[in-house]
Image (cartoon, rainbow, N blue to C red):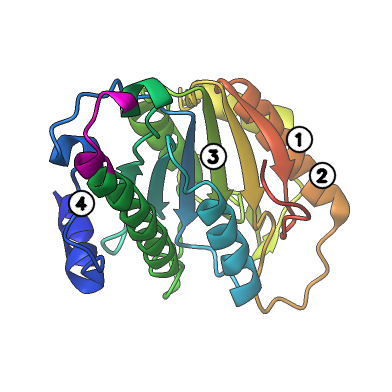
């Protein structure tokens, strides 16, 4: 319901500069055209509200998400923090962009209707791009939150949102410092990143039965090990152990860790 209100609210703000496209309906639904749905790439952005990203890192997340705002793709934006002070796992925006009609399909539709559909599809892309940028920008941390339930959030989102989607390809862009700080375990000691034993931490995850299921998704992390305004030296060995832990975690959660940025991505997501 909250996500539907956001979608309709964004529609009211943008007014879409057209009459032909009206979210949350797809263009083919609007014009009563039966088209078999197909998702090429499902792109999920999960943002950790407890991590403070600078403008450059925020723009990395936005630009990579916008690059996947294309026909036949599914876009999902979600946020998480900890179950404290009103924080919880929450979808912010979700939309499946209509696929393009094949030449054979276009042949069966009148020119007048085709003109309207083509305009609707163009406006739909514009709507989703604006919605994605707005949703991501408004989600980045605005306040300090003492706890970070990353493992619980990934278990929740992976099983309830990511695994069920039927798509040729699934990509997850995870914007987080990846520093768990919960009742399950903590990667901190005396307000600094601690040297974790990745095997021990994996056993803790297994004991708590909190491995996820990402449905074969490729995972890209931005912001790992990020501690804003900290003047303390971050030992590369600690970051390496952090990466090893998360690599093993995703392997056991039906996913592949493709890139672990500490903190910035060095290349665009493909």
Q: Earlier in the sequence, mark 3 or mark 1?
A: 3
Q: Alpha-carbon distance for marks 2 and 3?
A: 21 Å
The stretch drawn in magenta includes residue 109:
yes
Q: Which residues are magenta?
A: 107-114
In what element is the residue under mark 3? strand
Q: Earlier in the sequence, mark 4 or mark 3?
A: 4
Q: Which part of the image, by quadrant, shows the C terminus?
A: top right
Q: Alpha-carbon distance for marks 4 and 3?
A: 24 Å
Residue located beneath label 2 in the image: 240
Q: Nearer the viewer, mark 4 or mark 3?
A: 4
Q: Residue 188: percent from the left, percent from the top?
A: 64, 55
| Camera-side residue of 214 and 104 | 104
Residue located beneath label 3 in the image: 172
* Vertical arrangement, residue 124 with respect to residue 59, above or below: above
In what element is the residue under mark 1? helix
| Camera-side residue of 30 and 154 | 30
Residue located beneath label 1 in the image: 244
The residue positioned 64% from the left and 43% from the top of the image is 220
Q: Alpha-carbon distance for marks 2 and 1?
A: 6 Å
Determine whether, in the image, residue 54 is placed left or right of residue 145: right
Q: Nearer the viewer, mark 3 or mark 1?
A: 3
Determine whether, in the image, residue 66 is placed left or right of residue 74: right
Q: Earlier in the sequence, mark 2 or mark 4?
A: 4
Residue located beneath label 4 in the image: 23
Do labels 2 and 1 touch, CB within 8 Å? Answer: yes
In what element is the residue under mark 2? helix
Instruction: Characterize the local packing of mark 3: few (<14), some (14-19) or many (20 or more) Cα atoms within 10 angstroms.
Output: many
* Vertical arrangement, residue 11 with respect to residue 261, above or below: below
């Amino acid at each position: 319901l909250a996500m539907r209100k956001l979608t309709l609210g964004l529609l009211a703000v943008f007014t879409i500069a057209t009459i032909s496209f009206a979210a949350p309906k797809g263009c083919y639904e609007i014009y009563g055209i039966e088209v078999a749905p197909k998702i090429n790439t499902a792109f999920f952005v999960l943002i950790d509200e407890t991590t403070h990203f600078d403008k450059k890192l925020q723009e990395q997340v936005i630009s990579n998400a916008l690059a996947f705002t294309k026909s036949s793709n599914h876009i999902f934006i979600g946020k998480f923090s900890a179950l404290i002070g009103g924080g919880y796992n929450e979808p912010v925006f979700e939309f499946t962009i209509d696929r393009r009609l094949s030449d054979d399909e276009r042949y069966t539709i009148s020119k007048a209707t085709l003109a309207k559909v083509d305009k609707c599809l163009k406006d739909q892309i514009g709507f989703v791009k604006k919605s994605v940028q707005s949703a991501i920008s408004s989600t980045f941390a605005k306040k300090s939150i003492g706890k970070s339930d990353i493992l619980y959030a990934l278990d929740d989102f992976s099983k309830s949102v990511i695994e069920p989607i039927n798509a040729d390809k699934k990509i997850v862009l995870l914007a987080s410092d990846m520093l768990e700080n919960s009742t399950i375990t903590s990667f901190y000691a005396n307000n600094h990143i601690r040297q974790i034993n990745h095997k021990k931490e994996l056993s803790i995850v297994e004991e708590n039965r909190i491995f996820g299921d990402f449905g074969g998704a490729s995972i890209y992390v931005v912001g790992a090990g990020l501690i804003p305004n900290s003047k303390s030296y971050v030992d590369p060995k600690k970051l390496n152990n952090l990466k090893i832990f998360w690599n093993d975690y995703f392997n056991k959660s039906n996913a592949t860790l493709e890139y672990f940025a500490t903190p910035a991505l060095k290349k665009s997501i493909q």
